[in-house]
Every structure is written in C-alpha cells, then in structure tokens.
Image (cartoon, rainbow, N blue to C red):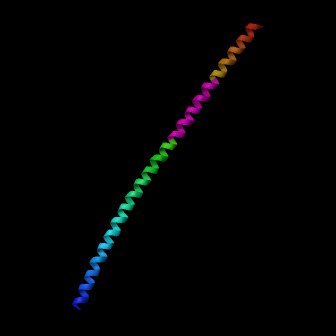
C-alpha cells in the first residue's frame, strides 16, 4: 500500500512537471504569435500608408499635368490669335 502511494505520488510529480513544461511552451508560443500578429499589423499599416501616399502623389501628379496642359493650351491659343 505504501509503495502504491509512493508510486502515485511520484507519478503525480512527473505529471505536474510535464504539465508545467506544456504550459510554459504554450505561453511562449502565445507570446510569439502575439508578436507575429503585431508585426503583421504594422506591415499592413505601412503598406496601406504607402498606397495612400502613392494615390495622393498620383492625384498631385495629375493636377500638375492638367495645369501644364491648360498652360500649353492657353499659350497655344494666344499664339494662334497673334498669328491671325
């Protein structure tokens, strides 16, 4: 009976140690997943900001091109009037 109690006690200690290791492993895995999630979030925010910056620059570029075309049209119209 005493041997059986010692055996059960020993098994309980081993089980507790294994459970503690599994718990620690899962905690570390969770931390790693949280860091990866945060890194992905930052990367997505950077990509989104880049797209927004590119879209803004595209709009600015279109406006500049439109202004230049209007200036050229105006200059061309003035030249045509001067010639006629």
Q: Position of residue 63 (x, y in %)?
A: 61, 27
Magenta stretch: helix, strand or loop mostly: helix
Q: Which quadrant holds the C terminus?
A: top right
Q: Is residue 55 covered in magenta?
A: yes
Query: In the current view of this chain or complex, which residue is farthest to the bottom?
Result: 1
Q: Position of residue 45 (x, y in %)?
A: 48, 45
Which residue corresponds to the image point at 27% horizontal and 77% vertical from the top-left?
A: 13
Which residue corresponds to the image point at 29% horizontal and 77% vertical from the top-left?
A: 14
Q: Quadrant of residue 27?
A: bottom left
Tell whether 60 sits left or right of 73: left
Up the image or down, 63 lies above or below 26; here it is: above
Region of the chain picked out in magenta, as a range: 49-66
Which residue corresponds to the image point at 71% horizontal and 15% vertical from the top-left?
A: 76
Q: Is residue 51 covered in magenta?
A: yes
Tell whether 76 sits left or right of 51: right
Up the image or down, 21 lies above or below 32; here it is: below
Which residue corresponds to the image point at 24% horizontal and 87% vertical from the top-left?
A: 5
Q: Position of residue 17 (x, y in %)?
A: 29, 73
Q: Quadrant of residue 59?
A: top right
Query: In the current view of this chain or complex, which residue is farthest to the left?
Result: 2
Q: Which quadrant holds the N terminus?
A: bottom left
Q: Position of residue 75 (x, y in %)?
A: 68, 14
């Amino acid at each position: 009976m005493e041997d059986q109690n010692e055996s059960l006690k020993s098994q309980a200690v081993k089980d507790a140690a294994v459970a503690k290791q599994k718990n620690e492993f899962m905690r570390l895995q969770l931390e790693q997943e949280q860091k990866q999630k945060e890194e992905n979030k930052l990367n997505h925010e950077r990509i989104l900001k880049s797209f927004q910056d590119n879209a803004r620059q595209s709009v600015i570029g279109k406006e500049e091109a439109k202004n230049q075309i209007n200036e050229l049209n105006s200059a061309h119209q003035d030249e045509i009037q001067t010639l006629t």
